[in-house]
Image: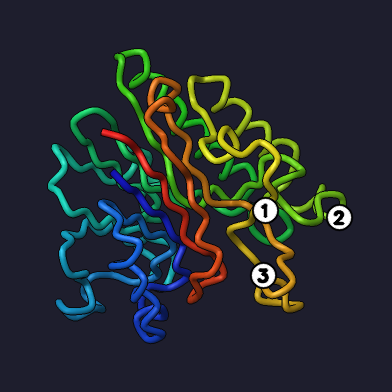
Amino acid sequence: MKITTWNVNGYRAILRKEALNWVPEVDPDVLCLQEIKAKPEQLSDEEMNIEGFSGVWNPAERPGYSGVVTFHKHQPLDVEKGIGVEKFDIEGRVIRTQFEDFYLYNIYFPNGGQENKRVSYKLEFYEKLLEICDKLHTGGENIIITGDFNTAHNEIDLANPKSNEKNTGFLPEERAWIDKYLDHQFVDAFRELYPEREKYTWWTYRFNSRARDVGWRLDYFLVSKPLMERVDDVVIHGNIMGSDHCPVSLILRS
């Protein structure tokens, strides 16, 4: 099974750029998109659909903001939107799909905001989600969390760690939550497979950063420890353009 995640920074924008043309070649079974910035009523039936997939949409209430969509080739057992907390759920940040042997979370984690004003909101989101995951783990369930975490975990995960120590996305209190997830039965699948590889998934549009590969690794697959033995690879598709992020794929044996 292949699961691909991508923060598209505007679903309508990538349609205009024909930036989903790579999907048949990569051939994911599940495609998780974040920051879609669109509601279904703003799209035609053709725009809402990708050939061979069914889609589950969870847009933000606020127009042109946030939102996630999960496209899947095979019908999941169950679908749930949000995490049951209104101040998070109105922003359309979460879709959970249940498959036979794991739950898949497609998440657009909050950004800390200008002048770090939303950092506390962001950390509350991390905390609430982990509470839910802890209950699932206690019940013997396996989980995959994917999406834009809006946090680079360690210095290896961004090009300029020293100059970003006081910026959201690399604050100690944000990074500590990634540590906490790893302490709660999760594994960062890419870093587990490639402990010393410097690869990024997001580049600012400024300063010609992508061409210079001055980026951050913000897009992750956290998998429950028992699932890690089934992970064949995590592929960062740095050559796929269309957004300030690039897609990332998890390849999971049946």
Q: Secondary structure at mark 1?
A: loop
- Is 48 positioned to the left or the right of 35 in the image? left
Q: Which mark is residue 163?
A: 2
State the residue position of label 3: 204
Image quadrant for the C terminus?
A: top left
- Where residue 20 sits, quadrant-wise, is bottom left
- Residue type indicated by callout 3: Thr
- Where residue 181 sits, quadrant-wise, is top right
Mark 3 and mark 1 lie on one chain; the one further toward the N terminus is 1
User: Residue 117 appears at what percent x and percent y?
Assistant: 67, 53
Q: Nearer the viewer, residue 60 or 75?
A: 75
Q: Residue at x 48, y 45 (%)?
A: 234
Name above or below for residue 201 compared with residue 103.
Answer: below
Image quadrant for the N terminus?
A: top left
Mark 3 and mark 2 lie on one chain; the one further toward the N terminus is 2
- Residue type indicated by callout 2: Ser
- Residue type indicated by callout 1: Lys
Q: Nearer the viewer, residue 190 or 125?
A: 190
Q: Secondary structure at mark 3?
A: loop
State the residue position of label 1: 117
Name above or below for residue 95 compared with residue 65.
Answer: above
Which marked residue is nearer to the observer: mark 1 or mark 2?
2
User: Residue 157 appears at what percent x and percent y?
Assistant: 69, 47
